[in-house]
Amino acid sequence: MIEELKVLSGFDKSGHKEGFDEIVFKPGETISIVGPTGSGKTAFITDIELLAQGDTISRRRVLLNGAPPPPSIRYNPALKPIAMITQNTKCFADLSVQEFLEIHARARGISSSQVVGKTIDLANMFTGEKIYNDLRVTILSGGQTRALMIADAIFIGGAPIILLDEIENAGIFKQEVINIIQDTGKIIIFVTHDPVIALHTQKRIIMENGAVKKVLLQNELEAFATQNLIEIDRRIGLIREELRSGSIITRELIGLKFAQEV
Ligand SMILES: Nc1ncnc2c1ncn2[C@@H]1O[C@H](COP(=O)(O)OP(=O)(O)O)[C@@H](O)[C@H]1O
Ligand SMILES: [Mg+2]
């Protein structure tokens, strides 16, 4: 059981100590990591993935439940409580989506017959390109693969800590999806450029020059603004799909209120 994940500060790219002592993450928490390209976002979550002990470029240390994890947990992928999904995540098995999930569920000792369907439904909430049960996992697009891997990590994989590195580009994150994630009691960290995801998370870490520059907690105004942004985002998603399928824009589609103002 993970009760707490803690990152102890390291050093920035210029060798200066980071301006925090420790950052604590609790189960059920959603966190975003933002900052310009090259600012150290991937390095930060990779430190978590590796359960770094002062032995990575940043010299950060990561504690699980207050203590350094034993080597058996650090080096045994089956015991590691962390799933990381990146732009490069791929499935190599020559199986259908359904078979792939069934085998994984069986390996995890999950007997629920609904879990496969639930996982595919969730994956379809992450991506606009529909994933069907009988598609081969090897022919899924990058966006579909990442969507499936995230849903699999949430419903089937046991990892209580999920790290997502800029996976939003090809997919669509919706409010329900983040809500589902929040309800799983996992620690979910998004490296993201998407303002909706960044504002939707409870904690926001800002990176600069390889170091954590700030840790912000979502405030009330941001929580409120997020609801509007989600609606705008949803509308843009709908318009994108309509344009792709050759539709012309209607008043309803762009939102009547907006249309009247034009
Ligand atoms: N604290 C640090 N000290 C030294 N080098 C770092 C540090 N953090 C990141 N780097 C290096 O800087 C480069 C960019 O970091 P990266 O994490 O890939 O940035 P981002 O994901 O924000 O684009 C990488 O080569 C990485 O190894
Ligand atoms: Mg990166």
Image (cartoon, rainbow, N blue to C red):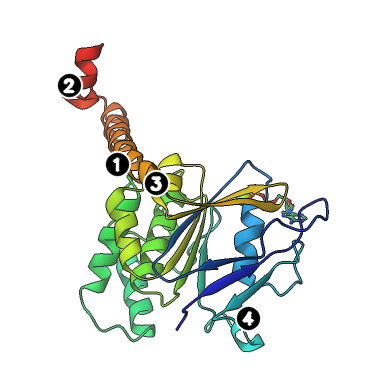
Against 236, residue 131 (above or below) is below
Quadrant of the image occupied by residue 246: top left
Q: Is residue 124 visible?
A: no
Tell me how far mark 2 sits from mark 1, CA to CA: 18 Å
Secondary structure at numbered mark 4: helix
Frontmost residue, 86 versus 194: 194
> Do callouts 3 and 1 mark residues in contact (Cβ within 8 Å)?
no
Q: Earlier in the sequence, mark 4 or mark 2?
A: 4
Q: Residue at x 60, y 44 (%)?
A: 35
Select label 4 or label 3 by which is in front.
Answer: 4
Q: Earlier in the sequence, mark 3 or mark 2?
A: 3
Residue beneath label 2, please? 256
Residue beneath label 1, please? 227
Quadrant of the image occupied by residue 242: top left
Tell me how far mark 3 sits from mark 1, CA to CA: 19 Å
Tell me how far mark 1 sits from mark 4, CA to CA: 39 Å
Select label 1 or label 4 by which is in front.
Answer: 1
Q: Is residue 74 visible?
A: yes
> Do callouts 4 and 2 mark residues in contact (Cβ within 8 Å)?
no
Q: Position of residue 123 (x, y in %)?
A: 33, 58
Q: Position of residue 218 (x, y in %)?
A: 43, 50
Amino acid identity at mark 2: Leu
Q: Residue furthest top?
A: 262
